[in-house]
Amino acid sequence: MAAGAAVPTSLESAPRIMRLVAECSRSRARAGELRLPHGPVATPVFMPVGTQATMKGITTEQLDALGCRICLGNTYHLGLRPGPELIQKANGLHGFMNWPHNLLTDSGGFQMVSLVALSEVTEEGVRFRSPYDGEETLLSPERSVEIQNSLGSDIIMQLDDVVSSTVTGPRVEEAMHRSVRWLDRCIAAHRQPDKQNLFAIIQGGLDADLRATCLEGGTICDLEMTKRDVPGFAIGGLSGGESKVQFWKMVALSTSKLPKDKPRYLMGVGYATDLVVCVALGCDMFDCVYPTRTARFGSALVPTGQLQLKKKQYEKDFGPIDPECSCPTCKRHSRAFLHTLLHSDNTAALHHLTVHNIAYQLQLMSAIRASIVEKRFPDFVCSFMNTMYGDQTLCPPWATEALASVGITLS
Amino acid sequence: MKLNLTKVVNGCRLGKIQNLGKTGDHTMDIPGCLLYTKTGSAPHLTQHTLHNIHGVPAMAQLTLSSLAEHHEVFAEYKKGVGNFIGMPESLLYCSLHDPVSPCPSGYVTNKSVSVWGGGGRVEMTVSKFMAIQQALQPDWFQSLSDGEASCEEAISIKRARKSVDRTLLFLDSCLRLQEESEVLQKSSIIGVIEGGDVMEERLRSARETAKRPVSGFLLDGFQGNPTTLETRLQLLSLVTAELPEDKPRLICGVSRPDEVLECIERGVDLFESFFPYLVTERGCALTFNFDYQPNPEETLLQQNGIQEEIKYEDQIKKIKTTGCNQKMTSFEINLKEKKYREDFSPLVKECSCYCCKNHTRAYIHHLLVTNELLAGVLLMIHNFEHYFGFFHSIREALKSDTLAQLKELIRRQASGELGNTNLTLH
C-alpha cells in the first residue's frame, strides 16, 4: 500500500456496512445508509447517549417514536452495574433495556480521561478502582471486548489509550502506538465479528504527524490502522479541551486519510454547529451527552441556539419551544408551562425537554441528509449559519475556515 | 351535572356522574378516584407516557398549593389551567392542599387561608382565592376552608367550632363571588365538611353545608395515620348520612386500598390517587391482588405457597423496620431489594401495563440502584394502572354483589396474612 495514496482503499475482505447514497460535489459531506444487525440507519446520524441502559427519563417507545434507530450504552458503567453476566442472562443489552433497534457501546476507555484520578494505564490495560465498592478492576482490550460481546451491541469500540487533547509530549505518541497494538488485541479477542461490528479509533491528539502515523503508518513499520480489517473508524481524542481551530484540523486530516467506503464516527461531538461543520468535513456518525444533559438543566435546543427555560423571561411566553418542531413537547406544551414545571419538583419537566432536544438533534441530521441527497448542502450550511448566528459573517472564525477548507464559502 | 345511583349496597354507592365539564358530555364512575398531579402534571409522566396507562380517570386533581403562586401567569394566559397544562380534554378538580405535603398549622385566620408552594407561603383571602379560581377555570374546586382542626393532636371543641364557622363563612362568600363571575358559571363549588373529631360540629357542618347550593362535598380532616382513621370512621358514617344522596362525596388524604374500602362503605364516592405516587417514590411497586375471583387451581397454589411466603415476609419486615422503609405497606414490593436483581419476570404477572409488558423486575432494580430517572417513570405507570384497576374491581364487585370477597382479600393482604400474592409462587 503506497503511503500518501490519494484515495485510501480497504482490504477486499473487510466487511462493508455502509452504502453511500449521495455525496456533496463541493465538500466532503456524504449521505449513506448503515446496514446493521438491528436494522438500517441513515447517515449522517446523531446517536443519543443512554449511558446506563436507559435514555434518561424517556422510554424506549418514546425514543423509537422520535425516529432514533441507534443509541449508545457505556461499557464502563454497565460493566460495573449490573455487570455483563446479568445482561447476558437478560438477552443482551437489547433485551435488558428492551430496545429493538441498534446499539453502539464504547470501550470504557474515555473514562480513563474523565476519571483519571482513579485509573492507571499500563500496556496490559487500565486499572480502575470501582467508585461503588472500591474493588480494583483491570480493563484490558480483551476484557473490554469480552464485556461488549456479552452486551451484544451492534457496534463495539476498540479499547484505546485515551489521552486528553490538552496533553502534549511523549505521552501522546505512546498512547497512539499503544492504541494500534490494542486494536490488534481487540480484533483477536472479538468472538462475534458476524454479529457485532468492531470499530477502530484513530488517536494522535492534536499532533498532525502523530495522527497521520496512526492512520497510515510511518515509513519503517506497518502500523497503520486503515489497513486493519475493521468495518468502521472512529476519530477519537478530540472533543476535549482543545481549541476549535486544532479540533477541525485534526478532523479534516483524519477524514482525508480514512477510506471512503467505511463510516467515520466522530466521538463526543454534538453541538449543532460542530455537527454541520463536521459533516462537511466528511464525518458520518456522532454522539454526545450534551443534548440530553442540558435538557435536565432546563435548556432547550433551538435553531438560534438554546433557551434557558427556567429564566423569568419565559414565565409568560405562551408559544412552544420551537413552532417548527414536530416533537410531542412542542405540539402540546408552551414555554410558560415548561418554565412553571421546571420550577417544581416534578421530573416530567426534564422528560419534556429530553424528548425535545433529542428531536432537535435528529431533525437537524435529517435536514442535513436531505440537503446532501438533494444536492444543496452548501446552501443548507449557509442558511443554518444565518439562523444560528443571525448572519453568516457572524459565524465563528474556526467554522468559517473549516468550511472554506472543503469548498463552502460563507458570504 | 347529574349523579345517577345505580345501586346502594351496605352503604356503598355505585353510579355515574354525568353531564360533566364545560361541554357537559363527560362522565365519571363512582366509586372512583382522581388522577393525582404535581404542578399540573402527573408525576414523572408526559402526555405520551400518561396515555400508555389504561383506565386513567376522567378527572384530574390539581392542587392550589402548586398553582397559586403562578396566579399572574394564568390571569394573563386567560384560557384556563386545562389548556395551560396541556390537558384540555380532562376534567379538572382543584383542591386547596397537596395530600402528600402536610401543611403547617397556625396560618388560618378569619379572613385568610395559606398554602405553601415552591416559592413559599401564599396567603389568600376569599377574593384572592376566587380571583385565582377565575384564572384557573377548573371544572370543580373546593371552597376555601379551615382544615387545621385536624392537623393538631388534641382538638378543642372551640377550635372545631371555629373551623366550621369559618368554613361556612368562606363558602358563602365564595358562592356570592361565583354568582358575580361570568367565567366561573361553568365551574362547580365543592363544599367542605369540617369539625375535627367533635361530633356535634361535624353534624352541624354537614347540615349547614348541605343547605348551600354546592355541587358536592369534600370530607376534610379524616386523614392521618391508620389508627386515627379507624376512630374517625364512625364519625364519617354519621356525616355522610346527613348529606344529600344526589351529590358526590369526595374525601381528601385517604388513598390506601384498605382505607378506601372502609370509606366507600361509609358513603364516600371519590378519592385522591396519591398512594401510588408515594409507593413510586420509595422505589416500590404495587402488587396487591384485587382479583377476588381467582380460578380454583390458582387458589390451591396460593394456599400451598402461603406458609413459605409468611416466613419470608416476616424476615423482610424485620429488616425493613430498622431501615428507612417503615412506611412501606404490604400492598407493595420494594424493587431495591437484592432478590430482584436477577428476577426477569414483570412487576405483576398478569398486569397489562406498559411497564409489565416491556420490562422486568431486574431492569427496574438496576434503574433504582443506578438512580436513573426512568425508574420513577416506569413505576409510576405501573402503580397508577394497578391502582386504577383496583377501583375498577371495586365497581365490578358492587355490580355483582361480591364486595365482601374483595374486602376480605384486601384485608388479608393489609394485615400481611397473605404476603404478596403474586400468583407465580414456585
Image (cartoon, coloured by chain):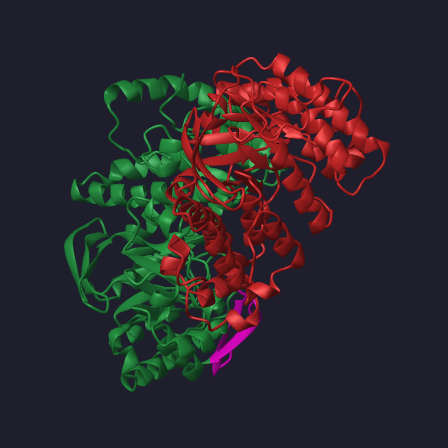
Chain colours: A red, B green
Quarter holding the C terminus of chain B is top left
> Residue A224, image x and y in percent?
68, 23
> Residue B153, image x and y in percent?
54, 61
Q: Quadrant of residue B354?
A: top left
Residue B32 appears left or right of A169: left
In the image, the segment drawn in magenta is B103-124
Residue B343 appears left or right of B95: right
Q: Residue at x 66, y 46 (%)?
A: A248
> From the viewer's perspective, is residue B59 above or below residue B291?
below
> Residue B245, image x and y in percent?
20, 63
Q: Residue at x 18, y 41 (%)?
A: B401
Q: Residue at x 77, y 38 (%)?
A: A207
Q: Foreground residue, A380 or B121?
A: A380
> From the viewer's perspective, is residue B121 above or below residue B255?
below
- As drawn, which residue projects farthest toward the right? A169
Q: Is residue B107 magenta?
A: yes
Quarter holding the N terminus of chain B is bottom left
